[in-house]
Amino acid sequence: MKILVTGAAGFIGSNFVFYMLDKHPDYEIIALDALTYAGNLETLKLVMNNENFTFVRGDIADRECVFNLFESAGFDVVVNFAAESHVDRSIEDPGIFLKTNILGTQVLMDAARKFGVKRFHQVGTDEVYGDLPLDRPDLFFTEDMPVTASSPYSASKASADLLVMAYYRTYGLPVSISRCSNNYGPYQFPEKLIPLMIANALADKPLPVYGTGENVRDWLYVEDHCKAIDMIIHNGKIGEVYNIGGHNERTNLEVVKTILRQLNKPDSLITFVGDRKGHDLRYAIDPAKISGELGWLPDTSFDVGIKKTIDWYLENEAWWKNVMTGEYQEYYNKMYGDR
Ligand code: NAD
Ligand code: TYD
């Protein structure tokens, strides 16, 4: 089996490459990544010499590059992780989100149509369901809920999902979509909540919590997301959407306090800052479909996963310090400077 993994130098894409090469040592993985600020070749160091792994630098929205790659490689499966993925950046500058997340997906699907694939899997997000109220813990996102969106990021991901389903219905492209809750684990870029708080706490810098910190996210250890995608591309039904989440809801404040406790740092580092514009209140996945149809269940509890994640950041300081140079400092000052 030959699989194209786009966005493989990013957080979840790289973890997926590691998972697949380990689980299916006979599969061939070709990675396509533009190496934006969020992609780092250092992340793929462990597999660069694996003879079943090839890295190609390129933009998924570059039609010529994508078509040449499909023509020369002949893929069985495409798993599209490549995206602009940070809500705060999408609020500052939506344009690149539309280009990569929507047009890039279109280019990949056009190539998949022309050269043929057995499966085009779109890595989606639960943010396409909008948000849930804080006072209705009985409500969860299910696959049949209408797609709506709060941020330019989620709107671009929702648009891509609609386009994927349109290519299935109109052209018969063999697609599937997964919509996962918030991931955490090794190699996450320190602009997202958990690695940003770990990095700041280790430096005894303020931990910027948006608004009241009462917003709720449903956290899943990244390896459990990778396992779910592996199951979907092998046994998931074509033309279907699968939600992925492990019923692990926490307020942002709970997550931040857990990190501080594990690092032996004081709660006084917590600093409440201005809220995110349009800030979604609560995400919570109902994973009944993927559990019932494919037998997926998460393996890693939050208590174990957060400890593993913190240990990883402690042991891999060189990796995150390296990605936090240059553009990151500019970004940090712009986002948090006078918030
Ligand atoms: P990330 O930002 O860490 O990585 C994105 C990767 O895509 C980077 O390596 C980047 O270089 C690459 N990329 C960006 N634009 C590209 C382009 N035009 N062409 C080729 N490569 C490009 O993101 P992530 O957190 O790993 O998310 C991966 C996917 O999973 C995204 O589609 C995201 O929407 C989805 N997702 C993420 C989460 C989460 O919690 N992080 C949850 C659900 C779904
Ligand atoms: P984030 O990791 O950006 O993921 P998403 O917005 O896709 O859920 O943020 C997770 C939550 O943490 C979200 O409610 C915003 C909040 N947050 C902060 O309070 N402070 C921060 O510095 C960041 C990056 C996020």
Image: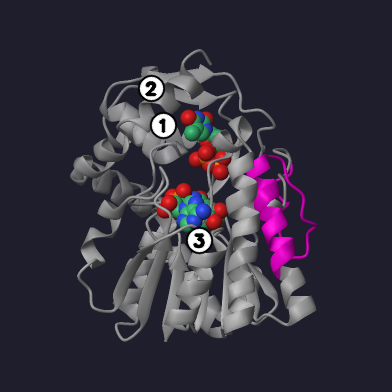
Secondary structure of the residue carrying numbered label 3: loop
In the image, residue 7 lies at what x, y percent?
45, 59
Q: In which quarter of the view is residue 54 placed?
A: bottom left
Q: Nearer the N terminus, badge 1 or badge 2?
A: 1
Q: Nearer the viewer, mark 3 or mark 2?
A: 3
Q: Nearer the N terminus, badge 3 or badge 2?
A: 3
Residue 284, visible in the rendered structure: no
Secondary structure of the residue carrying numbered label 2: helix
Please determine whether, in this image, residue 46 is positioned above or below residue 236.
Answer: above
Disc 3 C-beta below 8 A from ligand 1 = yes
Residue at 37% across, 52% down: 185
Q: Which mark is residue 81?
A: 3
Q: Is residue 288 magenta?
A: no
Secondary structure of the residue carrying numbered label 1: helix
> Is 38 left or right of 43, judged from the image as shown?
right
Q: Nearer the N terminus, badge 3 or badge 1?
A: 3
Number of marks: 3
Near mark 1 (Cα within 10 A), the count class, few <14, some 14-19 or many ≥20, is some
Disc 1 C-beta below 8 A from ligand 2 = no
Q: Amino acid at mark 3?
A: Phe
- Asked whether 33 or 128 is in front, the reply is 33
Image quadrant holding the N terminus, namely bottom left
- Asked whether 250 or 99 is in front, the reply is 99
Q: Which mark is residue 257?
A: 1
- The answer to the question of whether label 3 and label 2 lie on touching residues, with beta carbons closer than 8 A, is no
* Colour option used: one colour
Q: In which quarter of the view is residue 321 placed?
A: top left
Residue 23, visible in the rendered structure: yes
Q: Which residues are magenta?
A: 136-164
Q: Which mark is residue 267?
A: 2
